[in-house]
Amino acid sequence: MEGSAKSEGEAARAAAIVEDVARMLVETADPVWGGWGERQKFPHPDALHFLLVRGAETRDDALLDVAKRTLETSQAAEIHDAVEGGFYRFATQPDWSVPDYEKPLLANAKRLLAAAEAYQVFGTESLRDTARKAASWMRATLLDPTTGAFGATQDADPVYARLGSMDERRAHGAPEVDPTVHADRNAWAAVAFLKAGFVLGEGSLTETGLGALDFVLTRLFDRKRGVHHYWNGSPNRPGELRDQAAVLRAIVEAAHSGSTNRFLETGLTVAAWCEAELSLPDGSFRGDVHQDAAHASARSAEDLRAHGLLGEALLRLSVLTGRPELADRARAALLAFEDAWRPHGFAAAGFGRALHLVAREPAHVVVVGRRGDARTSALAEAGRRTYVASRVAQLVDPADEAALLEALGLEPREAPYASLRAPGVELTTTDPAELASGVEALRGERGPGA
């Protein structure tokens, strides 16, 4: 009972912060053009993602209206490359015009993720097209097909950007690409491509996401030193919290949208490394292995972003692996910023999104069956068809993943089956229609629309 009361108390504290973050984003948004900022206007896709997730689950039109206005006005404006797809770094005018013409990987990965999420929420074809074109540009321009990893950015060239056709652009010559592979940026690209592959039903996008994650874990992860920040022929700068957090987020997206659990053990290793090397007495984490306690206690915007991302990843990893202690750890880390997030404005969006999962425990759909079996596939499709923003979906093959199945408290059966668990809901079925109805019922409780 004591643990339950503590959990309920944490959920209530989290819910209050989430409401404050949502209110702040709505009140400070540009009422005409969307977005945030009176001079230079950055896309702030973390804020968009938070508004979409929160707005969908609470049916709050004010949140959804800000997100939709920002997405639609920016994709119709000069900050969006209408010729090749993708987005420039930021705009210098409130109407998203006169941009800085650099096209960074991180900004585009997050905009791709926001467009894919928004397409699930609104079903608007222009959002689907924006997502497809962004993914196409990223693969054509930043992706190294020999490694499966993405370069850091394409340089700004205003002359090139203002040319209105691909023929003109080819004649002029494309701007240079920085080939440096950053762990956090590639992890975000993996998240975005995995999500887009699932939402758009394009398996090649899923494979691109898995390839980027594979590169990071193969070349930039060391069990003793953690994830390194970048690769330029060799790994460099190990031990930054933002890299560990982004890689963990990509690992859980691989299980959710990519339907593969093969990275989960590595995810547990990364989580354990963070606990051993970065944890602080108040429940939070250092920004990197070299950060002293005084700097860590300063609670910078970068620290807040990293904790939001790590908290969200740990909460989802807890569900995917049957490790409740990871959720406990996530709550402690997030609530360590309870009184420190307000000065950071838009940087609190990812923090709010993570606390949303503390306030509303995610639903968990597990399909148990052999991969390749048509019955397994039918259940997996039924369990993921309806949009429920905080759902965690997973497919477990009992023949190859017996230990994971046991950790989740499930057992193998002769026929494929599905388990749906959510607060107040417990459903086990072999019928795709019954599973789809169960998930649809969550939509009524949690939002309009994985």
Image (spheres, rainbow, N blue to C red):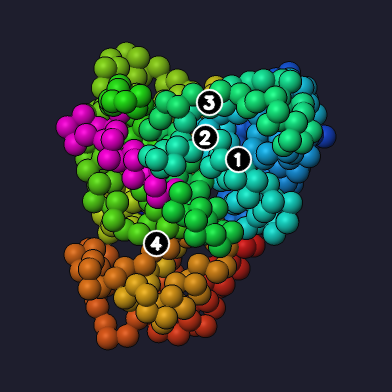
| Residue 226 is a magenta residue | yes
Q: Residue furthest front?
A: 171
Res. 259 mark? 4
Could you tell whether 7 is left or right of 113 in the image?
left
Secondary element under disc 2, as helix, strand or loop, is helix
Q: In this figure, which residue is indicated by the disc labeled 1?
A: 137
Residue 385: % across, % down: 55, 69
Query: Do the residues under discs 1 and 2 have CB atoms within 8 angstroms?
Result: yes
Q: Compare residues 25 and 205 and report the one nearer the observer.
A: 205
> Residue at left 40%, top 50%?
210
Q: Residues within 10 Å of mark 3 (few under 14, many from 20)?
A: some
Can the viewer see residue 299?
yes
Query: Do the residues under discs 2 and 3 have CB atoms within 8 angstroms?
Result: yes
Mark before the other along the chain sequence, 1 or 2 = 1
Q: In this figure, which residue is indicated by the disc labeled 2?
A: 142
Residue 175: % across, % down: 61, 24
> Residue at left 28%, top 26%?
235
The type of residue carrying mark 3 is Val
Q: In this figure, which residue is indicated by the disc labeled 3?
A: 177
Mark before the other along the chain sequence, 2 or 4 = 2
The type of residue carrying mark 4 is Ser
Where the N terminus falls, by quadrant? bottom left
